Image (spheres, rainbow, N blue to C red):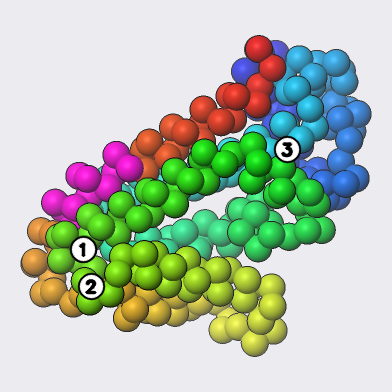
C-alpha cells in the first residue's frame, strides 16, 4: 500500500471511530487494527491522536469548501448567500463530521474542538476574513443590501446558520419532514435578511461578475485547510 493511500485509509478509519465512539474512547491501537496497519505505522503519518483527529475535521471542511467552489463554477447564481447556505446546510446534513463540528457535539468531539481552535487559529481568522470579503463583493455588485454595516450582516448570516444547524438536534421532533424543506426555509430566511431583489437578468449579470472575485477567496481557504492538514502530518 502506497504511503498516501495508507494515510487516507487511516484518516477514513479514524473518522469512522470518532463518530461511532467519540473522541475520548478512540485509541491509536484501535485505529491501527481497523486500518490493518501497525500502531507505529499510524505514528509514521500523524504525530499524535489529536493531530490525526484534527485532520479528520479539516478534511471534512476542505471537502465542503471544494464542493462550494465547484458549485460556483457551475452556476454563478450559487454566489448568492441564500443559495450558498442552502447547499452548505445540505452538506451539513449529509456529512456527520460537519454535523458534529458545527453543533460543537461534545459527545463526539470531546476536547478536540478546543484543540482545533488553538491549532487552527490562523485558519479560523482567515475564514472570518473570507466571509467578510465575500459580503463586501456582493454588496459592491448590488446583490446584498447596503443599508446596514457589513459586520452586522456577517453576524446575522452566522447566527441564522448556527440556529438552523443546532435546530437539527434541539428541534428535531418539531422540524418539517424533509431536509429539502428545511434547507429551503434557511435559504428564504437568508434571502429576506440580506439580499436585494434585482430582476433575473440583472441578478445573473451581477452574479457572473461577482463570482470571478469570490471563487479565489474560497479557493484560498480550501488551500489553507489542505495546508493545515499537511502541517499535522509527521515528516
Please tell me which residue is depicted at 59% across the width and 39% down the height of the picture: 120
* Label located before the other in sequence (1 or 2): 1
Nearer mark to the viewer, of 3 and 2: 2
Q: Quadrant of residue 93?
A: bottom right
Q: Image check: 29 left or right of 233?
A: right
Q: CA distance from mark 3 to mark 2?
A: 40 Å
- Residue sitting nearer the eye, 1 or 220: 220
Label 2 residue SS? loop
Q: Image check: 18 left or right of 144?
A: right
Residue 83 locus on image (x, y percent): 35, 65
The answer to whether mark 1 and mark 2 are in CB contact below 8 A is yes
> How many numbered circles are shown?
3
Residue 38 drawn above or below residue 148: above
Residue for badge 1: 139
Label 2 environment density (alpha carbons within 10 Å; few <14, some 14–19, many ≥20): some
Residue for badge 3: 53
Label 3 residue SS? helix
Label 3 environment density (alpha carbons within 10 Å; few <14, some 14–19, many ≥20): many
Look at the image and say whether residue 209 sits in the magenta stretch: yes
Please tell me which residue is depicted at 66% across the width and 22% down the height of the picture: 233
Look at the image and say whether residue 178 sits in the magenta stretch: no
User: Quarter of the image containing the N terminus?
Assistant: top right
Residue 138 locus on image (x, y percent): 23, 60
Please tell me which residue is depicted at 27% across the width and 47% down the height of the picture: 214
Residue 198 locus on image (x, y percent): 13, 74
Q: Image check: 67 left or right of 39?
A: left
* Label located before the other in sequence (3 or 2): 3
Is residue 16 visible in the rendered image? The answer is: yes
* Label located before the other in sequence (3 or 1): 3
Please report the bounds of the magenta region as a residue range.
Answer: 207-217
Q: CA distance from mark 1 to mark 2?
A: 6 Å
Residue 115: image tag:
none
Amino acid at each position: 500500500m502506497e504511503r498516501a493511500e495508507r494515510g487516507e485509509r487511516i484518516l477514513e478509519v479514524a473518522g469512522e471511530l470518532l463518530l461511532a465512539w467519540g473522541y475520548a474512547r478512540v485509541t491509536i491501537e484501535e485505529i491501527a487494527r481497523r486500518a490493518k496497519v501497525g500502531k507505529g505505522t499510524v505514528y509514521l503519518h500523524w504525530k499524535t491522536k489529536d493531530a490525526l483527529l484534527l485532520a479528520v475535521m479539516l478534511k471534512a471542511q476542505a471537502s465542503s469548501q471544494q464542493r462550494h467552489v465547484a458549485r460556483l463554477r457551475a452556476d454563478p447564481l450559487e454566489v448568492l448567500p441564500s443559495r450558498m447556505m442552502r447547499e452548505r446546510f445540505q452538506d451539513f446534513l449529509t456529512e456527520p463530521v460537519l454535523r458534529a463540528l458545527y453543533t460543537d457535539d461534545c459527545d463526539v468531539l470531546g476536547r478536540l474542538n478546543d484543540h482545533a481552535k488553538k491549532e487552527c487559529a490562523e485558519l479560523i481568522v482567515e475564514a472570518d476574513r473570507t466571509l467578510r470579503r465575500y459580503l463586501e463583493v456582493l454588496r459592491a455588485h448590488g446583490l446584498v443590501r447596503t443599508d446596514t454595516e457589513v459586520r452586522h450582516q456577517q453576524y446575522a448570516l452566522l447566527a441564522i446558520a448556527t440556529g438552523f444547524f443546532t435546530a437539527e438536534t434541539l428541534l428535531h421532533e418539531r422540524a418539517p419532514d424533509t431536509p429539502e424543506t428545511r434547507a429551503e426555509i434557511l435559504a428564504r430566511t437568508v434571502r429576506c435578511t440580506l439580499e436585494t431583489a434585482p430582476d433575473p437578468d440583472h441578478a445573473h449579470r451581477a452574479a457572473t461578475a461577482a463570482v470571478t472575485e469570490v471563487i479565489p477567496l474560497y479557493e484560498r481557504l480550501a488551500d489553507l485547510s489542505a495546508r493545515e492538514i499537511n502541517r499535522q502530518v509527521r515528516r
